[in-house]
Amino acid sequence: MNARAERMDPGPVVCVVGARPNFMKMAPILRALTAHGGGLPHVLVHTGQHYDADMSDKLFVDLRLPRPDINLEVGSATHAVQTAEVMRRFEPIVDDLKPSCVVVVGDVNSTLACTLVAVKKRTPVAHVEAGLRSFDRGMPEEINRVLTDQVADVLYTTERTAADNLRREGVAAERIMFVGNVMIDSLLANRGIAVPAPETLRRAGCDPALLGDPARYGVVTLHRPSNVDQRETLEPLLALLREVSARLPLVIALHPRTRANVERFRLGFLLAAPPIALLPPQGYLEMLGLMSGATLVLTDSGGMQEETTALGVPCLTARENTERPITIEHGTNTLVGRDPVVILRVIDEILAGGGKRGRVPELWDGRASERIVADLAQRFVHRAAMAEG
Ligand code: UD1
């Protein structure tokens, strides 16, 4: 590269992913970066927080994500060690690449770790999916959200309540931009190629007849530490699933954390009943196909609350709170906690033909990534080029 070209180079946009829920958010942003003008230079960094085939590699293929330019390979550890390792390994990347900005998504440990590194080096940080609050500081993700939003430079939000939360925390209005939901960009881009549910069961070695004809089944995912880390919470939840399966066949995709605890507490017998298909963590296209055809979804995931709202499928969220209130107010989501009476009542209502219908929230239109990239280009990339040129 000659000296002039070097002077004019604003530095790449560094995009960070770490764990499963980040991948579907970053995929459309990367596509928008490639499509913007002649393409904005960018680098994809995977921290390696999630690392195995089910939790990471398969999703890269499904989402047609490019292979990461850099993998920090941090793996699993305590929160302190994982966060510290990401920081330690990300710092030389920032020194080396001199990014025009760093883009982080969501609320996992990698989101906060990379934000801290970049802001201390005066590298601008853009946080996608900012301002969501469960107001539950017992959730590690809530700590990551609050801290990331305090120090990041620009905060892209998915729903209007997020700006209210941020303003209450003293964030200046000019740092906040309502852009819509990148997760829904991915959903809309991939809905047509989702894997049909019977095919997913067949691939997992389960009998697709379990789904019924016409299909009528529930999809279940549970992985929050507050639900699955203690026997006292996990055992009644699994007993409840067994009871639900007498009303409706269930497809359960087990997160590695949950599987480990089911084994540790020897609770596998509760899920051994025939109207339950027990699957490993699913790929993006498989999960999209499963959710699209489901009668209902029971989950403690953040993202699936939004995806079911976009799909118009009733969702029961096994938590006491949600950081995504629009899925309750406008969407198909109902907070049910862990109360079996409430859960069975809501399920019976849905099976009787009721259940929330909902509508798709504002700006969940498949174009959030385009809006983000247009703003990033104008805010950081072009400005950096002008300053250096
Ligand atoms: C993380 C995120 C959470 C997100 C979830 C989705 C944080 C604080 N939490 O939680 O916000 O909703 O991912 O999956 O960042 N494991 C594997 N293979 C993997 C990854 C993890 O077996 O590829 C195992 C680990 O060894 C560990 C367990 O799963 O025992 C949990 O992983 P961890 O990264 O601690 O957090 P998650 O519960 O996945």
Image (cartoon, rainbow, N blue to C red):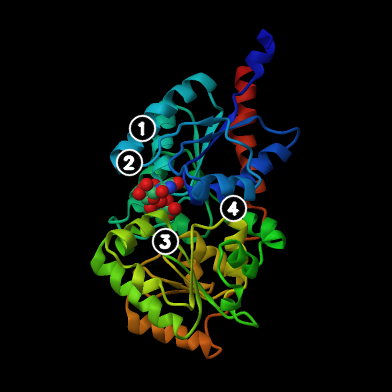
Secondary structure under the numbered disc 2 in the rendered image: loop
In contact (CB < 8 Å): disc 4 and disc 3: no
Label whose residue precedes the other's in the sequence (4 or 1): 1
* Residue on which the image places disc 3: 323
Q: Residue furthest top?
A: 3
Classify the position of the C terminus by image quarter. top right
Q: Nearer the viewer, mark 3 or mark 1?
A: 1
Q: Residue furthest bottom?
A: 352
C-alpha separation, residue under disc 4 versus residue under disc 3: 16 Å
Front-lying residue, 132 or 295: 295
Could you tell me if residue 361 is visible in this image? Answer: no
Label whose residue precedes the other's in the sequence (2 or 3): 2
Residue occupying the point 69% across, 14% down: 5
Q: Amino acid at mark 3?
A: Glu
* Residue on which the image places disc 2: 77
Can you tell me whether the CB of the residue at mark 1 lies under 8 Å from the nearest atom of ligand 1?
no
Give residue 131's mark: none
Give residue 182's mark: 4
Can you tell me whether the CB of the residue at mark 2 lies under 8 Å from the nearest atom of ligand 1?
yes
Q: Amino acid at mark 1?
A: Glu
Label whose residue precedes the other's in the sequence (4 or 3): 4
- Is 132 situated left or right of 380 in this image? left
Label whose residue precedes the other's in the sequence (2 or 4): 2
Q: Nearer the viewer, mark 2 or mark 3?
A: 2
